[in-house]
């Protein structure tokens, strides 16, 4: 192995390094190339930086009027030819001295170099077509979701008629994965949210001497809105993505096709157990998250404005109606079913490749969270108008 510290080796490297010499003062301005213009030599950072600096600092700027001398080039490959062709502005200079092999390489590079397309602005018609594509895509998803919901209703009717044939083992397994395993993270996030809300509210209520009203605000906000919404968002990110990934992997491994060949309905064996598990687990997780948030808010209220836990527990049932808890539980059931349906919808639409699996999982989480927030807003508007 050659020693790079050897002066003789270093001298050889310097001689074969690609170099560009510009003589703008000569008649017509001349550019001379020396060394080896190959990928191996151009990969040297020092040589590359030297060439780029010479090209950018040429005075006058490089153009077809320059005379180019390539006779001193020891070796030229397609990488060096491409660099040279770009420096020429992708056109042949008026005067160039080179050998026949060099000309052949440059002609090949010139033939297969594609000009970048000019930037195009979308016309009004193009924007209209883009809007049409988006409408068709949304319509396609809505049709599939409607079909999936209808199939779920039919599967529930079948389950009521023949409960012994139901996928109860799958339901229990999903209940454990969706519900029991989500308790630690939902309790932690709910507790921290309660602490933050109580701290922020206490700063404002203290200015008006209304410290005791923190129980009213925390009770209504957490029990009616934030508890179910926070639990649904966490479950959408945790379990909704898991549902899509599980069914998507079954698509990639062709298990879904095998089930169809065996006559096993996807809706009854895949969608129904997950929807049932979500419908049962979501209200429980919502209550669990709300309790954790109330506990955090109660402790923060005691530390910040001196509202004792005993007063908090005593006043909470008096200032919060039972209808708020009923509404929260009802919303949680709807949230759970929607998250399960959206996860199964995107999982069944996954194509048999890993890229589609990643896109489907991401789209499932984003869609689930968006739909949950929209439906929660719809619930708030509807039940406010009926006085609940």
Image (cartoon, rainbow, N blue to C red):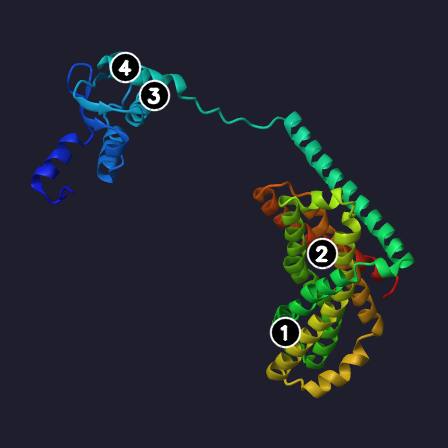
The numbered mark, 3 or 1, whose residue comes first in the sequence reads: 3
- Left or right: 73 as drawn, with respect to 143: left
Residue at the spot of label 1:
191
Q: Quadrant of residue 42?
A: top left
- Left or right: 294 as drawn, with respect to 104: right
Residue at the spot of label 2:
373
| Residue 338 numbered mark, or none | none
Q: Are marks 4 and 2 in contact (CB under 8 Å)?
A: no
Q: Quadrant of residue 219?
A: bottom right
Q: Nearer the viewer, mark 3 or mark 4?
A: 4
Q: Are marks 2 and 3 in contact (CB under 8 Å)?
A: no
Q: Quadrant of residue 43?
A: top left
In the image, what residue occupies the spot 13% across and 44% down? 3
Q: CA distance from mark 1 to mark 4?
A: 74 Å
| Residue 89 numbered mark, or none | 3
Which quadrant is home to the C terminus?
bottom right
- Above/below status of 120 relative to 289: above
The numbered mark, 4 or 2, whose residue comes first in the sequence reads: 4
In the image, what residue occupies the spot 27% across and 14% down? 103
- Above/below status of 173 relative to 61: below
Q: CA distance from mark 4 to mark 2?
A: 65 Å
| Residue 103 numbered mark, or none | 4
């Amino acid at each position: 192995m050659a020693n790079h510290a050897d002066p003789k080796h270093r001298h050889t490297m310097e001689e074969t390094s690609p170099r560009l010499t510009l003589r703008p003062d000569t008649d017509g301005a001349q550019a001379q190339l020396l060394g080896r213009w190959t990928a191996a030599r151009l990969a040297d950072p020092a040589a590359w930086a030297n060439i780029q600096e010479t090209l950018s600092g040429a005075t006058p700027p490089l153009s077809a009027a320059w005379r180019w001398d390539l006779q001193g080039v020891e070796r030229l490959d397609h990488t060096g030819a491409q660099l040279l062709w770009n420096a020429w502005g992708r056109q042949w200079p008026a005067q160039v001295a080179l050998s026949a092999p060099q000309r052949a390489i440059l002609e090949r590079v010139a033939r297969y170099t594609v000009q970048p397309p000019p930037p195009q602005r979308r016309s009004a018609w193009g924007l209209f077509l883009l809007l049409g594509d988006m409408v068709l895509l949304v319509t396609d998803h809505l049709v599939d979701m409607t079909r999936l919901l209808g199939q779920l209703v039919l599967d529930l009717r079948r389950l009521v008629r023949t409960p012994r044939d139901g996928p109860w083992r799958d339901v229990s397994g999903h209940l454990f994965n969706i519900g029991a395993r989500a308790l630690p993270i939902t309790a932690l996030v709910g507790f921290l949210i309660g602490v933050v809300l109580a701290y922020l509210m206490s700063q404002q209520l203290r200015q008006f001497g209304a410290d005791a009203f923190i129980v009213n605000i925390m009770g209504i906000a957490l029990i009616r809105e934030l508890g179910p919404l926070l639990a649904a968002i966490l479950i959408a990110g945790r379990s909704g993505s898991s549902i899509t990934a599980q069914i998507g992997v079954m698509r990639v491994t062709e298990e879904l096709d095998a089930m169809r060949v065996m006559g096993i309905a996807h809706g009854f064996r895949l969608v129904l157990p997950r929807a049932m598990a979500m419908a049962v687990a979501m209200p429980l997780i919502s209550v669990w998250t709300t309790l954790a948030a109330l506990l955090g808010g109660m402790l923060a209220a005691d530390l910040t404005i001196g509202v004792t836990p005993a007063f908090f527990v005593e006043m909470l049932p008096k200032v919060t109606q039972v209808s708020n808890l009923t509404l929260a539980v009802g919303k949680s059931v709807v949230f759970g079913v929607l998250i399960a349906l959206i996860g199964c919808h995107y999982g069944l639409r996954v194509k048999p490749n890993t890229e589609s699996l990643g896109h489907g999982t991401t789209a499932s989480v984003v869609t689930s969270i968006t739909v949950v927030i929209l439906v929660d807003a719809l619930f708030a508007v509807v039940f406010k108008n009926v006085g609940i």
